Structure formats: structure tokens, C-alpha cells
Image (cartoon, rainbow, N blue to C red):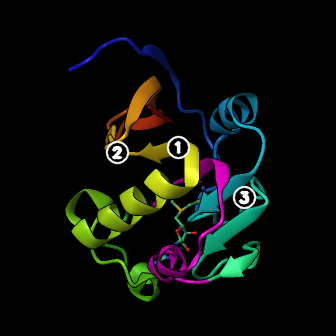
């Protein structure tokens, strides 16, 4: 594995907005200091970051749609894709999501994100429980976000097109 990327370890911080939890102030600050230009935000929830925001249910989305359907039909180009996919998939409220598995286990969704990103963006900023890699991109920086207690560590991955 190449290790020529930056690593930063920091606290995750807190929000108390319920699900979908808004980005914590720490995460929002990192995002705002890192990305600029034309931004597509997938799984955007209540966030207002990004000029195009795709979410299946949230009123703050600019397009209320299943991300899979969006990726199959859109062909615009972006400087950044920002995404914070759902991972609490055992809960009752996620029945409307049309996503049954975390992205790590959802090959269709993974392939759609990979194919779309390869064609349409220079950078990806991906918040997840894993540190994903996309073919054709390299890691530029990883932020390890430690929530404390026994909660899951989140990872913010900046992937840059090679
Ligand atoms: C982890 S939350 C993102 C929260 C967001 N970062 C915020 O600041 O509010 C995941 C979001 O994905 C949305 N979602 C779930 N399945 C989806 C799908 N198939 N297509 C589009 N959005 C989906 C949910 O509605 C939820 O808002």
C-alpha cells in the first residue's frame, strides 16, 4: 500500500440533531477548509454544503432522489463529490432508503460511485466507517475522527484523481 498521503487524527465532536445527524462542527470545518468549486453532495441529509445535493427524503436536498438512480442518469462534471452514506442500516427508519447494506457490501452502489467518479470528478471527500479507495484515484489525506467511548471511528477520505 502506498503511504504517501497525509493523516490527521482528531476528535469527532458532537451534534444532537437526531438522525440524519448533521456533520459535527469539526467535520463541517474540515470540509469547508478542504473543498471548493463545483460540489456534488450525495446523501446530503440536512446539510446545505454543495450546489447540488442528492437525498432520498430530506427537504434540504436540491434533488430528492435515490442516489443510484441519480448516478445512472446524470453526466455533469464536478471538482468534488462529497458523500456521507448511511450506515445505521438496522434501524426501522431506514426502510425508505432503498439501500439494504453498507456501501462496503453493496457492489452495485460501489460500482455506480466508482464509474461516475472516474468520469465526472477530480476529487472525492467520503465520510464513512471505512477508508474507501476508488480505482483511478489516490489517497491525498485521511482524517481519523475519534468519537470516544465505544462508538465507531469515522474516517474522512480525500481521494484525488491520478
Ligand atoms: C448519514 S446521513 C447523512 C447526513 C448528512 N451528512 C447531514 O449533514 O445531514 C445519510 C443520508 O442518506 C440519505 N439516503 C439514504 N438512502 C438514500 C438513497 N438511496 N439515495 C439518496 N439518499 C439516501 C438519508 O436520507 C440520509 O439523509
Whether 73 is among the magenta residues is yes
Disc 3 crowd rating (10 Å Cα; few below 14, some 14-19, many 20+) is some
- In magenta stretch: residue 61: no
Please say if the residues under marks 1 and 3 sit with CB atoms less than 8 Å apart.
Answer: no
* Residue drawn 54% across the image and 54% down it: 83
Disc 1 target residue: 124
The answer as to whether callout 1 falls within 8 Å of ligand 1 is no
Position of residue 54 relative to residue 14, above or below, is: below
As drawn, the label of residue 148 is: none
Residue 39 image position (x, y, % from top left): 71, 52
Instruction: Pick the quarter of the image with the C terminus.
Output: top left
Compared to residue 141, the image places residue 43 above or below, namely: below
- Earlier sequence position, callout 1 versus callout 2: 1
Relative to 74, does residue 78 appear above or below in the rendering? Answer: above
Q: How many marks?
A: 3
In the foreground, 102 or 136? 136
Relative placement, left or right, of 93 versus 110 is right
- Determine the residue positioned at 38% across, 67% down: 112
Q: Earlier in the sequence, mark 1 or mark 3?
A: 3
Looking at the rendering, which quadrant does residue 120 occupy? bottom right
Q: In the rendered image, which quarter is residue 3 located in?
A: top left
The region drawn magenta spans 65-86
Residue under circle 2?
Answer: 134
Amino acid at each position: 500500500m502506498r503511504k504517501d498521503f497525509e493523516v490527521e487524527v482528531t476528535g469527532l465532536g458532537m451534534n444532537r440533531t437526531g438522525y440524519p445527524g448533521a456533520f459535527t462542527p469539526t467535520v463541517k470545518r474540515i470540509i469547508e477548509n478542504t473543498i471548493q468549486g463545483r460540489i456534488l453532495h450525495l446523501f446530503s441529509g440536512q446539510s446545505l454544503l454543495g450546489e447540488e445535493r442528492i437525498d432520498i427524503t430530506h427537504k434540504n436536498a436540491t434533488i430528492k432522489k435515490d442516489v443510484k438512480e441519480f448516478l445512472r442518469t446524470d453526466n455533469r462534471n464536478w471538482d468534488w463529490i462529497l458523500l456521507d452514506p448511511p450506515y445505521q442500516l438496522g434501524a426501522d427508519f431506514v426502510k425508505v432508503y432503498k439501500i439494504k447494506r453498507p456501501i462496503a457490501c453493496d457492489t452495485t452502489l460501489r460500482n455506480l460511485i466508482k464509474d461516475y467518479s472516474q468520469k465526472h470528478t477530480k476529487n472525492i471527500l467520503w465520510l464513512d466507517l471505512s477508508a474507501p479507495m476508488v480505482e483511478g484515484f489516490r489517497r491525498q489525506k485521511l482524517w481519523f475522527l475519534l468519537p470516544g467511548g465505544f462508538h465507531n471511528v469515522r474516517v474522512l477520505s480525500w481521494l484525488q484523481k491520478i
